[in-house]
Image: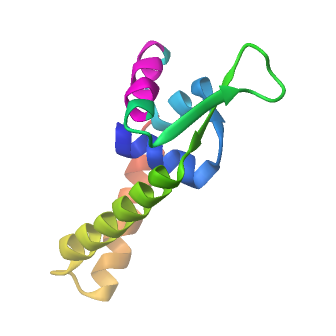
Amino acid sequence: MQASAIMALRRDGPLSQAMLGRAIGMEPANVHGLVARLRKQRLVRAAPHPTDQRAVCITLTAAGERHASAIAHISAASAEATLQPLSPDERVVFLALLRRIASGIS
């Protein structure tokens, strides 16, 4: 879940804790602990939300950005290794089917 949160912040920019939880499909009660662990590792910072006094805005730190780059690199290498046995045409079909399955999950 930590990697998902880091990548969601990289993709979407600063998010409130509630929005971060929705972005990664995490129960609101668990997001606070996740953010606390990421803060302890100095991968994110939390600050008052600029427009909502009740909310906290979560952003990546420079270390978090570096961590996100490493995650993206590892993810791409893993995807390539997984798809390597398939021909280019088979990859297109396989990925289309995965997208179809994922769109039905929510």
| Direction bottom: furthest residue | 88
Residue 38 drawn above or below residue 86: above
The location of residue 61, given as percent across then percent down, is 54, 47
Q: Quadrant of residue 58?
A: top right
Question: Does 99 appear in magenta?
Answer: no
Q: Main secondary structure of the magenta part?
A: helix
Quick check: 35 left or right of 53? left
Residue 50 drawn above or below residue 52: below
Q: Nearer the viewer, residue 93 or 73?
A: 73
Q: Quadrant of residue 91?
A: bottom left
Q: At x 51% / y 39%, what residue is drawn?
A: 44
Residue 14 drawn above or below residue 35: below
Q: At x 46% / y 46%, what residue is drawn?
A: 6
Question: Does 30 appear in magenta?
Answer: yes
Q: Nearer the viewer, residue 39 or 11?
A: 39
| Direction right: furthest residue | 51
Q: At x 46% / y 22%, what residue is drawn?
A: 31
State the colouring used for the structure image.
rainbow
Q: Is residue 72 in sight in this rendering?
A: yes
The location of residue 1, given as percent across then percent down, is 35, 36
Quick check: 71 left or right of 57? left
Q: Is residue 104 in sight in this rendering?
A: no
Residue 87 drawn above or below residue 33: below
Q: Which residues are magenta?
A: 29-38
Numbered disc total: 0
Q: At x 28% / y 69%, what residue is drawn?
A: 79
The location of residue 53, given as percent across then percent down, is 78, 16
The location of residue 72, given as percent across then percent down, is 39, 64
Quick check: 59 left or right of 27? right
